[in-house]
Image (cartoon, rainbow, N blue to C red):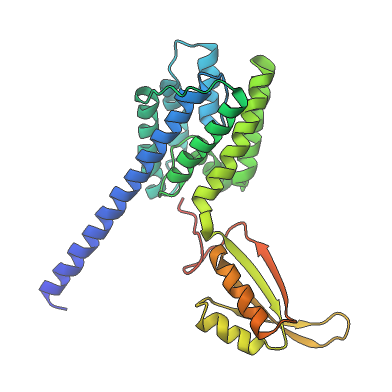
Amino acid sequence: MDEEEKGKVKRSAIVKSSTQILWNLFLLSIGSIICAVAVNAILIPQNFFSSGFTGIALFIHYLFPSNPVGTIYLLLNIPIFIVGWSLVGRRFFFYSIIGMAIFTLALYTVHLTIPIHDKILCALLAGIVNGVGSGIVLRSLGSAGGTDILCVILQKLFSIKVGTTTLIFNGIILGVAGITMSLEGALYTLVYLYVNTQVLNLVVLGLSKRKAVFIISDKWERLSEEILRKNKRGVTIIEGIGGYRREHKQILYSIITFQDLPVLKKMVSDIDPEAFVVVMDTLEVMGAQVGNQPHW
């Protein structure tokens, strides 16, 4: 490779890296602004709580209204980032610092009025808005700080699952808030959190959610060829033995995206209507082709 070609490759890499950085900053900014709208326009006017560090910041703000939510959120994050410096991946760490800073700034500057007074409608809308914002943030290579960093730290130190940490943390916040502040507010917050979780999963996973498929068929050879050739998906052939007749069976195992599932089912039905097919949800898939490798 001559110097000119090396220069082109280097410039191409720089452009690609710069584009990726700008895209992630865009996702962090838009997501943080949307989350700030949910907090300032709905949660605070309705005296609702929230999950994670935002929930703690709101709780302290309700007790001491002179303290802005943004300032409290920033102060809560400082010790977590200090501890997380040596435990969290550098790229995720720095993007999360930027995300936390943008979200804090948005809490100070983004102020809207949403003319909805029914509390259950407010809880539903807050869940939708915050779920969209949080989902956009999580599609970047960082986070907005808070419990995202805490979950990673606890998993690295004590092997505590992210979902377990989130559940316990949010349970404590809602319990304390319900006892000391307003039980009604805590219950409305449960509605908000449920909707928020569903919308967040939809934004993050969307139609790219992976499915695990098991196929038992006498025409397994043709089916495996079709999966590889037409569906362009990998397939693993597992040796099995029938429990009743003790016959040897070949089991096809493949991971596909949600939108590919109808195509696969029709293909199996056309080739072998008697095929036994099992489709299962996947919690997480790690791999180059259809995986969703954790970025922290």
Can you name the residue that lies furthest to the right here?
244
Counting every numbered tag in the picture gives 0
193, above or below 75, in the image: below
The answer to whether residue 113 is above or below residue 165 is: above
Q: Does residue 86 appear anywhere in the picture?
A: no
Q: Depth check: 114 or 55 in front?
A: 114
Where 22 sits versus 133, above or below? below
Residue 257 in the image: state x and y as whole percent.
55, 65
Q: Quadrant of residue 176?
A: top right
**Residue 80 position in % (x across, y down):** 47, 34
Provide residue 264's location: percent of width, then percent of height.
60, 74
At 45% from the left and 37% from the top, the residue drawn is 145
Relative to 261, is 74 on the left or the right? left
Q: Quadrant of residue 245?
A: bottom right
Instruction: Judge left or right: residue 36 versus residue 235.
Output: left
Q: Is residue 18 above or below residue 132?
A: below
Quarter of the rendering occupied by the N terminus: bottom left
Q: Residue at x 43, y 17 (%)?
A: 68
Q: In the rendered image, is residue 134 in sight?
A: yes
Residue at far left of view: 4
Report the residue at 62% width, 60% height from top. Answer: 282
- The residue lying toward the viewer, choosing from 118 and 126, is 118
